Image (cartoon, rainbow, N blue to C red):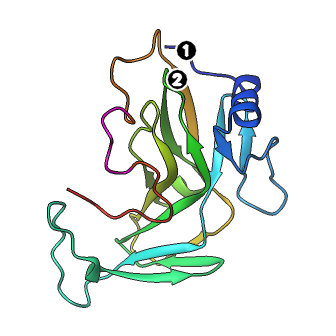
């Protein structure tokens, strides 16, 4: 399962709409970098954030999720409380080819500040804006910047296309825009 290089990512983005909007070269001046890299694509955090809070004593239950555990904030910066997390989504909309699996890793700039990014793999033929969880593992409030790099996506090409793709299964997070909360 080879990892795909910059020229393949560029071609798939520009000719097949795999990433929209697509930034063809790394942007770095005064920002946490984003755009095309050697073997991946650094996506940007949107300016919509759902900050976890326990004001209403909500219980986190993935089978019966209650939105009262979040406060929505919009803006250029989000402050994540100590030992808490925030959900956001990518600025970019992804359309994954049938023979590709995409994995995500957090940016080292944030990791060095104690912020951990979690995203499940983007499965073959999934499409949408990616919901991103950012955990603040520190005892201090932490900043996350909208419209700057938050994570890197790596594209792994399978030996062949799977028998059943995410689209074939009619996956519950298909076509999502904005932050998608847990669904059963």
Task: Classify 10 Å Cα crowding around label 2: few (below 14), some (14-19), many (20 and above).
Answer: some
Name the foreground residue: 88 vs 145: 88
In the image, which residues are magenta?
Answer: 168-173
Q: Secondary structure at mark 2?
A: strand
Task: Classify 10 Å Cα crowding around label 1: few (below 14), some (14-19), many (20 and above).
Answer: few
Which residue is depicted at the point 81% across and 41% down? Answer: 24
Q: Which residue is mark 1?
A: 2
Q: Position of residue 12 (x, y in %)?
A: 69, 29
Give the side of residue 80 with respect to residue 55, left or right.
Answer: right
Which residue is depicted at the point 50% across and 83% down? Answer: 73
Which residue is depicted at the point 52% across and 79% down? Answer: 79
Q: Is residue 160 above or below residue 128?
A: above
Label 1 close to label 2 by CB (< 8 Å): yes
Q: Is residue 80 above or below residue 7?
A: below
Name the foreground residue: 94 vs 23: 94
Give the side of residue 104 with respect to residue 13, left or right.
Answer: left
Q: Which mark is residue 128?
A: none
Q: Alpha-carbon distance for marks 1 and 2?
A: 6 Å
Where residue 86 sits, quadrant-wise, is bottom left
Q: Secondary structure at mark 1?
A: loop
Which residue is depicted at the point 77% across and 24% down? Answer: 7
Q: Is residue 89 above or below residue 55?
A: above
User: Which quadrant of the figure contains the C terminus?
Assistant: bottom left
Give the side of residue 42 with respect to residue 98, left or right.
Answer: right
- Is 32 magenta? The answer is no
Furthest residue toward bottom: 55
Q: Which residue is mark 2?
A: 156
């Amino acid at each position: 399962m080879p990892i795909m290089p910059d020229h393949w990512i560029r071609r798939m983005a520009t000719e097949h709409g795999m990433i929209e909007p697509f930034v063809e070269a790394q942007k770095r001046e005064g920002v946490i970098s984003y755009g095309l890299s050697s073997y991946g694509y650094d996506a940007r955090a949107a300016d919509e954030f759902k900050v976890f809070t326990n004001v209403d004593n909500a219980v986190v239950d993935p089978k019966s999720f209650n939105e009262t555990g979040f406060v929505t904030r919009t803006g250029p910066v989000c402050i994540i409380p100590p030992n808490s997390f925030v959900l956001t989504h990518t600025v970019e909309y992804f359309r994954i080819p049938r023979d590709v699996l995409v994995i995500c890793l957090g940016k080292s700039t944030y990791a060095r500040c104690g912020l951990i990014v979690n995203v499940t793999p983007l499965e073959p033929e999934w499409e949408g804006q990616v919901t991103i969880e950012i955990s603040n593992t520190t005892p201090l409030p932490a900043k996350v910047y909208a419209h700057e790099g938050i994570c890197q996506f790596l594209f792994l090409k399978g030996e062949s296309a799977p028998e059943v793709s995410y689209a074939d299964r009619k996956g519950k997070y298909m076509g999502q825009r904005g932050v998608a909360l847990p669904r059963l």
